[in-house]
Image: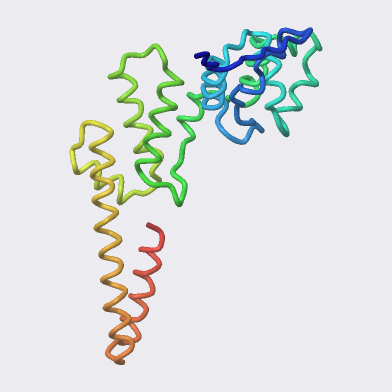
Amino acid sequence: MEIIIGVITVTRGNNSRNKSYSNNKKPATFDGTSSWQDYLVHFEMVAEINGWDNISKALELTTCLRGSAQAILSDLRPDLRRSFTHLVTALASRFQPSNQAQMKSTTREKSQSLPELVQDIKKLARLAYPTAPMEVREQLARDCFIDSLNDADLEWAIFQGKSISIDDRVRIGLEFEAFANGHRRKFTNRAGLRMQTGMITVNEQDDCQQMSSIMDRK
């Protein structure tokens, strides 16, 4: 009895670079609005999976660029566009600002949580001081975290907590914000009830409005 397991047909083109490209994983695109360092790590991983050499990496990278990132290509000589090293250098100089300068100017965004802020700061510290001992990077990250809060009450609460590690500072900060938000809700509910029942004076109403304004800044 004859059993046919299967037949494999291989079609070879004139250009060896065409082989198996239909099965390659495709990197995400880059338009300059996201982190270049993060994108480069992603691209290198995809390139390793696909087994690309440096010329293939250069060609693939050029096809992944969009918007202002794609405009970088016109600044390079045609031969340098096929050099992965030159492409990466050009993109890094345009889309990877000084990490040390970024650390000094970091400020917490209004909708940014403390864990998200710390994650960004740790990453900046790692990129800005790659050869520094871990203890030094930790100290720099702790100082940057406090400076970036832009909230005197929160800074004081963390300082009073005598925290040592940056993770401890985050924990204390989260506890303080949870307390402040709970106190705000309690104050607002009580003030609203007194206003509904007419048991609040004009001066108390002004105090409520002033307190509400203060709490809104938190």
User: Which image quadrant is residue 54 in?
Assistant: top right
Q: Residue at x 26, y 39 (%)?
A: 169
> Residue reaching furthest bottom?
198
Is 35 located above or below residue 47 in the figure?
Answer: below
157 and 12: which is toward the camera: 12
69 and 211: which is toward the camera: 69
Expressed as whole percent of the image width and height from the top left, the position of residue 74 reads 80, 21
Q: Residue at x 24, y 58 (%)?
A: 179
User: Which image quadrant is residue 163 in?
Assistant: top left
Q: Residue at x 43, y 47 (%)?
A: 112
Expressed as whole percent of the image width and height from the top left, the position of residue 31 reads 66, 33
Is 115 located above or below residue 92 in the figure?
Answer: below
Expressed as whole percent of the image width and height from the top left, the position of residue 49 reads 53, 17
Q: Residue at x 53, y 14 (%)?
A: 48
Quadrant holding the C terminus: bottom left
On the rendered structure, is 153 left or right of 160? right
On the rendered structure, is 170 left or right of 24? left
On the rendered structure, is 93 left or right of 67? left
168 and 30: which is toward the camera: 30
